[in-house]
Image: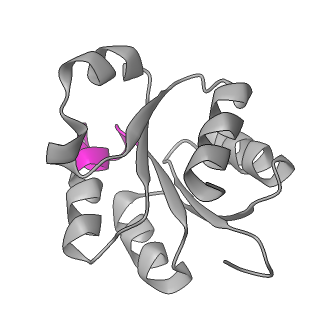
């Protein structure tokens, strides 16, 4: 937490998507930290101690989001980690989240009501 607000780390190499996600999350009353690559995201995780992480599946490399999830687990991450993907529905139906150290997947474009409901469920339960 930072200033009494849960911190959400958003990681995406698309600056427009990252800006939109930041605006949405802040409008829901959370604090936001951002990173534009998996490598930067791992550094921000260690620096900012977020309460939840949302990372794009396909950044600088096709599966950098899943690689990041594994690296986060190795770094001791115990907070919920969600991937953001344009193939979210297919990924959701064909992937074992536990194997990837994920809590879930959001479909792009992200639906604000789904994001709000999920953040509330994960952080305020």
Does the magenta-highlighted stretch encompass residue 63?
A: yes
Residue drawn at x 19%, y 72% is: 74
Query: How many numbered circles does the render carry?
Result: 0
Residue drawn at x 24%, y 66% is: 73
Q: Residue furthest left?
A: 99
Q: Where is residue 82 in the image (x, y as percent from the top left)?
A: 43, 45
Q: Position of residue 102 (x, y in %)?
A: 31, 47
Magenta residues, start to end: 56-66
Does the magenta-highlighted stretch encompass residue 78?
A: no
Way the structure is coloured: one colour
Q: Is residue 67 above or below residue 110?
A: below
Residue drawn at x 67%, y 47% is: 120
The reply to whether residue 59 is in sight is yes
The quadrant holding residue 34 is: bottom right
Q: In which quarter of the image is the N terminus?
A: bottom right
Q: In this view, does 55 lie above or below 91?
A: below
For the residue pair 75 and 79, the one nearer the viewer reads as 79
Q: Is residue 18 above or below residue 106?
A: below
Residue drawn at x 37%, y 45% is: 103
Q: Position of residue 99 (x, y in %)?
A: 14, 45
């Amino acid at each position: 937490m930072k200033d009494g607000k849960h911190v959400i780390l958003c990681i995406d190499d698309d600056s427009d998507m990252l800006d939109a996600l930041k605006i949405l999350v802040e409008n829901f009353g959370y604090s936001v930290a951002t990173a534009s690559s998996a490598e930067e995201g791992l550094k921000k995780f260690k620096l900012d101690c977020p309460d939840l992480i949302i990372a794009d599946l396909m950044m600088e490399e096709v599966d950098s989001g899943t690689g990041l999830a594994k690296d986060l687990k190795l770094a001791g991450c115990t907070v919920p980690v969600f991937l953001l993907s344009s193939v979210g529905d297919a990924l959701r139906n064909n992937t074992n989240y536990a194997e990837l150290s994920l809590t879930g997947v959001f479909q792009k474009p992200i639906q604000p009501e789904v994001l709000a409901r999920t953040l509330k469920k994960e952080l305020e339960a």
